[in-house]
Image (cartoon, rainbow, N blue to C red):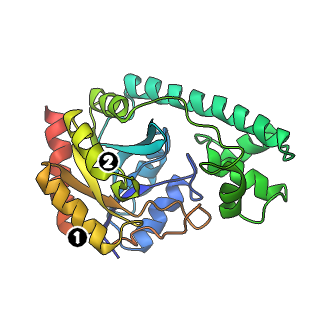
Amino acid sequence: MSQLDLHLHTTYSDGSLTPEQTVTEAAARAVTLIAITDHDEVDGIAPALAAAASCGIEVVSGVEINTTVGKEEVHILGYGFPTDSAQLRDGLQRRRDARRVRLDAMLARLASLGYPLELETVLAIAGKGSVGRPHLGRALVAAGYVPDLATAFERLIGNRSPAYIPRSPFTPEEAIMLIHQSGGVTSLAHPGKLGDPIRFLRRLKEAGLDALEAYHSDHAPAATQRMLAWARQYGLAVTGGSDSHGPNGPHTVQIGAVPIPDEIGAPFRELLAEKSSG
């Protein structure tokens, strides 16, 4: 069990634990440094900070911005920004608006395939958070169309599935610029899931990428070692996290489950301090 976890999702995006529950769970697992990285949303950070005040947990502001390059999804993590940044909030609101347009299109596609759902049902499942495909998948499960979330993605809403609609165009370079202009630092999320990580590392290093998420629940030990070597080669800092979405998320990974060396924390804090002072 690690003492830090810099990739966590709450009910403000597609996680199943509230920010307060996420902090409590982290404390129970002796994780002392966490980042709330909801998709295109930062409103879960404040309640996590409030809950952490009495738990001895350090909470870093974070966000995960979903971008695309061609047909490939590229996720950019942002850290250490002021959550009241008007520029950041405006940029993320535009991303959430695009998510809503995409949701409407996928609902129409599902209805044409014989799986009608009410918009209000999906929005109720999403609650306060940024709506996405996991919420749509849970609505399909609740309606009895599929037995579980994995099947919903496999049969209907996953990439290359019949009801899939691509995201609106937004590049990783644009995400990096948004986070930097808002006072934060950036990391390429789970690069091991990309078809050609080196191609993206070269491209995003030129765009100002600060770090690489070498430690992740989808990275086997050998993959992690490759990521660490690439981070050294390209002069990038290292981040890591479980990508936990809670017990009812699309992937059941416990907070702190990814072994991350404690010494990752010090250079990460230094990177945040350098950005904030610069």
Q: Residue 191, image x and y in percent?
A: 34, 54
Please, what is the three-letter code of the amino acid marked with disc 2? Answer: Leu
Earlier-in-chain disc, 2 versus 1: 2
Q: Residues within 10 Å of mark 1 (few under 14, many from 20)?
A: few
- Write down the quadrant of residue 1 in the picture: bottom left
The answer to whether 238 is drawn above or below residue 258 in the figure is above
* Quadrant occupied by the C terminus: top left
| Residue 209 in sight here | no
Q: What residue sits 51% from the left and 30% below the top?
A: 95
Q: What residue sits 26% from the left and 39% below the top?
A: 204
**Viewer-closest of 30 and 227:** 227
The answer to whether 147 is drawn above or below residue 80 in the figure is below
**Viewer-closest of 217 and 160:** 160
- Locate residue 228 relative to residue 51 in the image: left or right: left
Q: Residue 22, image x and y in percent?
A: 49, 60
Please, what is the three-letter code of the amino acid marked with disc 1? Answer: Pro
Q: Residue 111, image x and y in percent?
A: 83, 40
Reading the image, the residue beneath label 1 is 261
Quick one: SS at disc 2?
strand
Reading the image, the residue beneath label 2 is 188
- Write down the quadrant of residue 75 in the picture: top left
